[in-house]
Amino acid sequence: MPKYMSGNEIRTAFIEFFKSKGHTYVPSSSLVPHGDPTLLFTNAGMNQFKDTFLGLEKREYNRAVTVQKCTRAGGKHNDLDEVGFTARHHTMFEMMGNFSFGDYFKDDALAYAWEFITSPEWLGLPTDRIWVSIYTDDDQAFDIWTKKVGVSPDRVVRLGEKDNFWRMGDTGPCGPCSEIFFDHGPSIAGGPPGSPDQDGDRFIEIWNLVFMQYEQLGPDNLVPLPKPSIDTGMGLERLAAVLQGKHDNYDIDLMRALIVASAEATKTAPDGPHAVSHRVIADHLRSTSFLIADGVLPSNEGRGYVLRRIMRRAMRHAHMIGAREPLMHRLVPALIQQMGDAYPELNRARALIVETLKLEETRFKQTLERGLRLLEDEVGHLGEGQPLAGDVAFKLYDTYGFPLDLTQDVLRGQGRGVDEAGFKAAMDEQRRKARESWAGSGEVGTEKLWYEIKDELGATEFFGYDTEVAEGKVTAIVKGDARVEAADIGDQVMVVVNQTPFYGESGGQVGDAGVIFSAGGAEVAVSDTLKKLGAVWAHVGTVTKGTLKVGDVVELRVDSERRAAIRANHSATHLLHEALRHRLGDHVTQKGSLVAPERLRFDISQPTGLSAADIAAVEDEVNRRVLGNSEVITRLMSPDEARAQGAMALFGEKYGDEVRVVSMGGPHGELDRDYSIELCGGTHVRRTGDIGVFKIVSEGAVAAGVRRIEALTGTGAKAWLSERDHLLTEAAGVLKVKPDEVPTRVAALVEERRKMERELAELRRQVAMSGGAKAEGGNEAKDIAGIRFAARVVEGLPAKDLKPMADELKKQVGSGVVVLIASNEGKASIVIGVTDDLTGTLSAVDLVRVGAEALGGKGGGGRPDMAQAGGPDASLAPAAVEAIEKAIAAKKAS
């Protein structure tokens, strides 16, 4: 038997082994992919190296090792529906991988793999229980395995393109691969790879080694890569099952601890009848927590929609095993205990994860109850033993989170089934639409052009923290999609300079504007500045004078007034962030921001809206810090040192070896743990007093659990306050009271209006019952060709009140047609109601169009039982009633 290793020990061993082989350890990237619009979530270890493999990006190292968190729960790779029912499907898993970027190739890759899995110093797997597969014609790999590594030829299996040739897509790098299998022994059913019973559980693939040696240029165009590379992937969970003597990933320590936590929290057994539910909860707890930590929040579209589906699937299982109160958030400490050391973002986002899970599960319990009521209503319309329609079952699944098996369980006790074919058809249609509508996700991939510029010219040096004017040399000019050597008057260009004081848009702060002057007399009006690849500043603008050329020496001048306003707003967001955390709690974290010259926008994780008292308290605290006029201090330090100082940072942001830490609002002009300390690369005021004044002008929801605050500072805030004072003074003049008496006077007017509305409602009720003083035809219904008919013409009632009156008259008539015509300032509004028993032969829509035409109008619309129209001449109301009567008689006669 293999030696036992915990999941955390395996992860550490893999990293240490490859570091000993000269690999650079690269931490896991975010589950939200950067630079790849084709991916919904990061689903493989190589995702973050895609541009490196394509030759678009160069790194300081040419061999790397990672343990990448991955999610497969949407898009092309979707394992969601299988999770809990199989031994090896997960929505979140860890992929261990080693990579060579044009460095070593097959010989070293296979030798490293064999040493790691068989050496007693590392995993110590018995060699006689290891099988490998290779691509059918990869004789090189066969020779390496059998002659250099020493694997018995009878345990090397050749497989075809489907199993052992890896492609990134229709085009791009690709190549044959070799997979390593572990034999669990004859007591487990299944055969070796390539055999008829290979799908059994005896032989389990634990490692895939891809030899990227070709580039697919087209369907039949495969060319060798100049620098063949290596990309491997080994699932930590599968390997842990082997080393822990398990045949099921859910029995390994990392998963079992969460299953036991779920069982203890619900006072149920971890195995037995509720085993599947506990497995679903454990898996989904991992994926949802990691997604939230990486900035995804539940919503009705994109990544947030997939997150919500995962959450609700787990929460439905919690409901099934009897959890009456929200469960998922109570399991977060168990997850952090298992994985928090390896993934510190879980600890940093603990409060947000807990709050989000609790809020979503509380809401879902209400949704669950509504879904059950909908199911009950739908069943009430069915005949005895009649199955539930597939589209209804799908609506329950898609809208209320009811999987098909839950609906079937509910109906089974009633002797009913579900139209499964109809459900599948509805599911397939939704998937088809989803595929068509999914236009990609993640950040837009940067053009190859900018990689070339970066590789050739290097990074732009930014001087803008300390100056707004600097000299530089034009190193590149981009016009359209191409580099040019010169640009003339009127050309719209992006100018790259070796050094600049212009801030490039990032971190929510907009790019600087200003002017570039060349020594030869050219001028460029810069409207924006972009940061390409995080290193190259692109000054976006229009040539307004002369000809700008590559190589020109230029002077760059930032629009100083605009920059000052941006500085004030950016510093205010830091003070606002901390004030919100003080007022609302530590779960508040930044979810997005916009720092522009005219305003600031700040999105936060917060499940409920801010009260007027909250807003006032936050404003007061920010303004106290502004008036304190403390110095704004920036320091460079390592990310770990910054966090040790209490600096806030969001996982998913990329930080280098040094980070910029901005501290403000403290009483002594020093790093103050009691107030704002953040990692930030933006520009800021020198003292908080430079902000001037701070005013929140709006607050509202932008997504589930996310609130947006918009605010103003400095002259913008003062102008806003001045305008509000003007409006108050103007309102006081209209009301003929003093400004401080406006609220009392408005409240009195509102109460007077409510009183008048109550009196009017009573009048309307009397009109509806009596037909009104000027009702045509009296109060009694007449008979038209066997149809009861009641018509009323009333004066002065708003059109919106006619439908409720028509409903009341329909109740009085019982069966028949009712007509109401209201006259207002000479114009007519008409509503016609037809009782439900007559809509098969008479349509309110047809009749109302007849009435409208008689009133001098046309058109109208509604439903067969209720329709509405209008006309310009209310004096024609009697003629309209007569025309409707004739239409009813004609319809009956036909």
Image (spheres, rainbow, N blue to C red):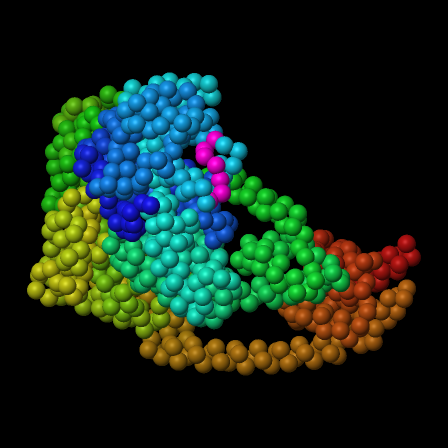
Q: In which quadrant of the rendered image does the C terminus lie?
A: bottom right
Measuring 51% from the left and 80% from the top, which residue is drawn there? 752
The residue shown at (45%, 42%) is 186
667 with respect to 185 (left or right): left
Q: Identify the residue at image location x=48%, y=57%.
A: 276
**Relative horizontal placement of residue 244, taking residue 659 as reference (left or right):** right
Q: Is residue 487 above or below residue 73?
A: above
Q: Quadrant of residue 269?
A: bottom left
Q: Position of residue 169 (x, y in %)?
A: 43, 30
Residue 159 included in the magenta stretch of the image: no
Based on the picture, tell me whether residue 189 belongs to the magenta stretch: yes
Quarter of the image for the N terminus: give it. top left
Q: Nearer the viewer, residue 461 or 71?
A: 71
Judged left or right of residue 886, residue 79 is left
The span shown in magenta is 188-194
10 lies above or below 712? above
- Residue 48 place in picture, x, y as percent: 31, 38
Q: Residue 604 falls in which quadrant of the image?
A: bottom left
Q: Tell which of 134 and 157 is nearer to you.
A: 157
Image position, residue 139 (x, y; %): 37, 20
Residue 839: name its quadrant: bottom right
Query: Residue 559's spot in the image, x, y percent?
Result: 20, 43
> Does the rendering let one see residue 401?
yes
